[in-house]
Amino acid sequence: MAVTKTEVVSARVAPDVKAALAAAAQTERRSVASMLEVMVLSYCSQHGISSTPAKAAGRAGAKSARK
């Protein structure tokens, strides 16, 4: 079953970091977004970080805490 992608991530990085990401993506024949996803999941796996999505209730709690 395909995963529906609904979240957007935006970040500013140094030009050399962007170039390195683009080069890695090209080497792997992936899009930059796909390469970033692979890198993040790999990092999480190597460092014992859960990559399960946050629960909707957790997000709602964070929003109400800001009010």
Image (spheres, rainbow, N blue to C red):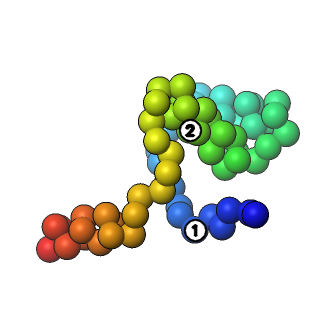
Q: Compare residues 30 and 55 and report the one nearer the observer.
A: 55
- Residue pictured at 40% horizontal, 63% vertical: 55
Give x and y (percent) for residue 24.
73, 31
Quick one: label 1 or label 2, which is nearer the N terminus?
Answer: 1
Q: Is residue 62 left or right of residue 37?
A: left
Residue closest to the far top = 46
Measure the C-alpha gap from mark 1 to mark 2.
Answer: 17 Å
Picture layout, residue 4 above or below residue 40:
below
Q: Amino acid at mark 2?
A: Val
- Residue pictured at 66% horizontal, 39% vertical: 38
- Tag 2 residue: 40
Give x and y (percent) for residue 48.
46, 30
Q: Is residue 15 visible?
A: no
- Residue pictured at 33% horizontal, 70% vertical: 57
Give x and y (percent) for residue 46.
54, 25
Classed neighbour count for the residue bearing mark 2: other residues with Cα under 10 Å, few (<14), some (14–19), many (≥20): few
Q: Which corner quadrant holds the N terminus? A: bottom right
Classed neighbour count for the residue bearing mark 1: other residues with Cα under 10 Å, few (<14), some (14–19), many (≥20): few
Q: Is residue 20 visible?
A: yes
Q: Amino acid at mark 1?
A: Thr
- Tag 1 residue: 6
SS for dot 1: loop
Quadrant of the rendered structure where residue 39 is? top right
Q: Compare residues 10 and 48 and report the one nearer the observer.
A: 48
Q: Which corner quadrant holds the C terminus? A: bottom left
Contact between labelled residues 2 and 1, with CB atoms less than 8 Å apart = no
Give x and y (percent) for residue 27.
82, 30
SS for dot 2: helix
